[in-house]
Amino acid sequence: MPGQISNEMGALALVGIAIVFGVLALIATVVSIFKRLDQRWQAHEAKLAESATERTQTIDDTTLLLISAAAATVVAGRFRVRRIRRLLPIRTKRTPWSAQGRAQLQGSHVITKKRG
């Protein structure tokens, strides 16, 4: 009879709903497994980063700066100086000796332009 659901159609609908819910449960399980793996991986990376900061530095800051600058130049080519920061605080006492040393350093880095 039209308009009525037969027993076969009802059973087929229940089986279809069970399959859909089963697949959804499987997807939820896989997502939760990946979430746990990601959390473990992030905890492991955080532990490695923390242990890396606790290690003592084996080279001085100047050497590290020079190596970093050399590596950056090799990778990206020549650089333009866009900003210069003050290394010493403004309230640091200035002596004639330190001023003369700075003047000599800055004077030794004068670049002459090529003509022609």
Image (cartoon, rainbow, N blue to C red):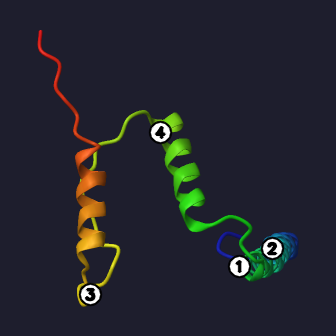
| Labels 2 and 4: the sequence-earlier one | 2
Of residues 14 and 111, the one nearer the viewer is: 111
- Label 4 environment density (alpha carbons within 10 Å; few <14, some 14–19, many ≥20): few
- Label 1 environment density (alpha carbons within 10 Å; few <14, some 14–19, many ≥20): few
- Residue at 12% of width from left, 15% of height from top? 115
- Residue at 28% of width from left, 68% of height from top? 85
Asked if marks 1 and 2 touch (Cβ < 8 Å), the reply is no
| Residue 27 placement: quadrant | bottom right
Q: Tag 1's secondary structure?
A: helix
Q: Tag 2's secondary structure?
A: helix
| Labels 1 and 4: the sequence-earlier one | 1
Q: Which mark is residue 53?
A: 1
Of residues 74 and 10, the one nearer the viewer is: 74
- Quarter containing the C terminus: top left
- Quarter containing the N terminus: bottom right
| Labels 3 and 4: the sequence-earlier one | 4
Q: How far from the left and from the top, in percent, is residue 18? A: 85, 76
Residue denoted by label 4:
73
Q: Which mark is residue 6?
A: none
| Labels 1 and 2: the sequence-earlier one | 2
Residue denoted by label 2:
41
Asked if marks 1 and 4 touch (Cβ < 8 Å), the reply is no
Residue denoted by label 3:
93
- Label 3 environment density (alpha carbons within 10 Å; few <14, some 14–19, many ≥20): few
Report the Cα–Cα distance between label 1 and label 2: 19 Å
| Labels 1 and 3: the sequence-earlier one | 1
Q: How far from the left and from the top, in percent, is residue 17? A: 79, 75
Report the Cα–Cα distance between label 3 and label 4: 35 Å
Of the residues shown, which amino acid type is indicated by label 4?
A: Thr
Q: Is residue 16 left or right of residue 111?
A: right
